[in-house]
Amino acid sequence: MLEIVALILFILMYVLMIIFSDKREYVALLCAFIYILIGVLPVDNIISSIDFNVLFMMGGTMIMVYYFIESKMPVLIADFLLDKSPNVMWVTIFMSAFAGLISAFIDNTATVLMIAPVAMAVCKKLNINPVSMIIALAVSSNLQGAATLVGDTTSIMLGAHAGMDFNQFFILNGKLSIFFAVELGALASLLIMFFMFRKETKEVEASKDVRVRDYFPSIMLIILVLTLIGASFIPNKPDITNGLICMILSLVVMFVDAGKYKTTNRILADLKSVDYQTLLLLLGLFLVIAGITNVGVIEDFSKLIVRIGGNNVFLLYTIIVVGSAIFSGFIDNIPYVATMLPVVGRVSATLGISPYLLYFGLLSGATLGGNLTPIGASANIAAVGLLKKEGYNVGFKDFMKIGVPLTVSALTAGYLFIWFVWR
């Protein structure tokens, strides 16, 4: 009976998060509170259910990204790309590729917020409609979020769940890992982008007057990535190691900046910029997932997937990739991945196979599927919001005209790569 109640509440939580998308963190926390109240999640398990490593990694990265944006370094790099672009088509492709590169190491939404204003300024200067370029940026940032351990919330969640370190997103058990599947998908999407924007031949010119205010945040961001790589070689390190690295280095940036400018105003602005909604959402989801796992919902769901797949690994892999892409096109991929990671682990154990084939299929489908619609990913919502502020209302059809072809091409390339390497 408790399992049925937990499942009903879980489905209701999803429905409410779709309806009240701007309040989804409160919905997740309310569901977690009810779980604790009715005994789905025992009180003794609350602390152990929270993945503080994920929360610290997210929080630390958010803090550092604020100073990176404020330093104007992303704008300088984007302006450099603009200088190398002969026309609008190449601007779109270079900007999109740059957004993808940045998003492999920092949050996708932050990437859009860094690059989209530059693209908007370019479009205003050229007097062209910015919708296609901004959507392409958002899609590209989502495409490569799963490339590294620190590129996206879902990547961090996979790393924590599967015990993967930074280097294992590149090489795992002697095989090419998910980074190469993501990059192959990104290349496929760029080829489609060449075709889609082939008629945008208007010439462009860089402004050449952008100055970086402070190089320290960029240096520290590089140090952060290198430190995470170095930490991956430490045997038997505490589970919270990567989170502490992100938090400590972000605090160094924060206090060095305060000392340099002799004010705490920027610290306050930085703390206000942190995406507390996402952190609270993750906190609630950790508790909710622990609850449904505790009462057996995850185990039953994994058995259902095995039954549907008929113990056919290829069919199961295909169901997980395609199903994840479709689901993530309409619901946030964070709660979906949080739900499915333990399911995929159970399915793999039931079949007696390595879990990485299904893990990577899940992550690629859930990450890329968010590009199918304007509500499928936070980066898309941010991009559409920016366009709306500028007077451009983007509907589902407008977004999907660009998002669907890029998603299908990237997903197909990644799907085939993962299968042939990890089957």
Image (cartoon, rainbow, N blue to C red):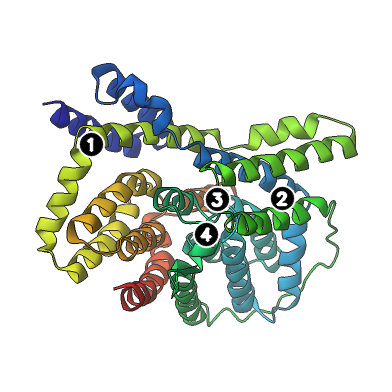
Q: Earlier in the sequence, mark 1 or mark 4?
A: 1
Residue lying at the far front in this picture: please name it: 235
Type of the residue with mark 3 = Thr
Q: Is residue 357 visible?
A: yes
Query: SS at mark 3?
Result: helix
Query: SS at mark 4?
Result: helix
> How many labels, in total?
4
Horizontally, residue 262 falls left or right of residue 151, namely right
Quarter of the view holding residue 362: bottom left
Q: CA distance from mark 4 to mark 2?
A: 17 Å
Task: Say few, some or many: other residues with alpha carbon within 10 Å of mark 1 (under 14 / 14 to 19 / 20 or more).
Answer: few
Circles 3 and 2: CB distance less than 8 Å?
A: no
Quarter of the view holding residue 119: bottom right
Q: Find residue 233 and report its horizontal and vertical position in percent.
A: 58, 59
Q: Find residue 200 and report its horizontal and vertical position in percent.
A: 57, 78
Which numbered tag is attached to residue 109? Answer: 3
Question: Label 4 belongs to which residue?
Answer: 138
Q: CA distance from mark 1 to mark 4?
A: 29 Å
Please tell me which residue is depicted at 38% across the width and 59% down the height of the picture.
Answer: 363
Q: Earlier in the sequence, mark 1 or mark 3?
A: 1
Horizontally, residue 46 falls left or right of residue 134, namely left
Which numbered tag is attached to residue 69? Answer: 2
Type of the residue with mark 4 = Ala
Q: Find residue 403 and report its horizontal and vertical position in percent.
A: 42, 65
Query: SS at mark 1?
Result: helix
Q: Find residue 307 and report its horizontal and vertical position in percent.
A: 9, 57
Q: Earlier in the sequence, mark 1 or mark 2?
A: 1
Q: Earlier in the sequence, mark 3 or mark 2?
A: 2
Type of the residue with mark 1 = Ile
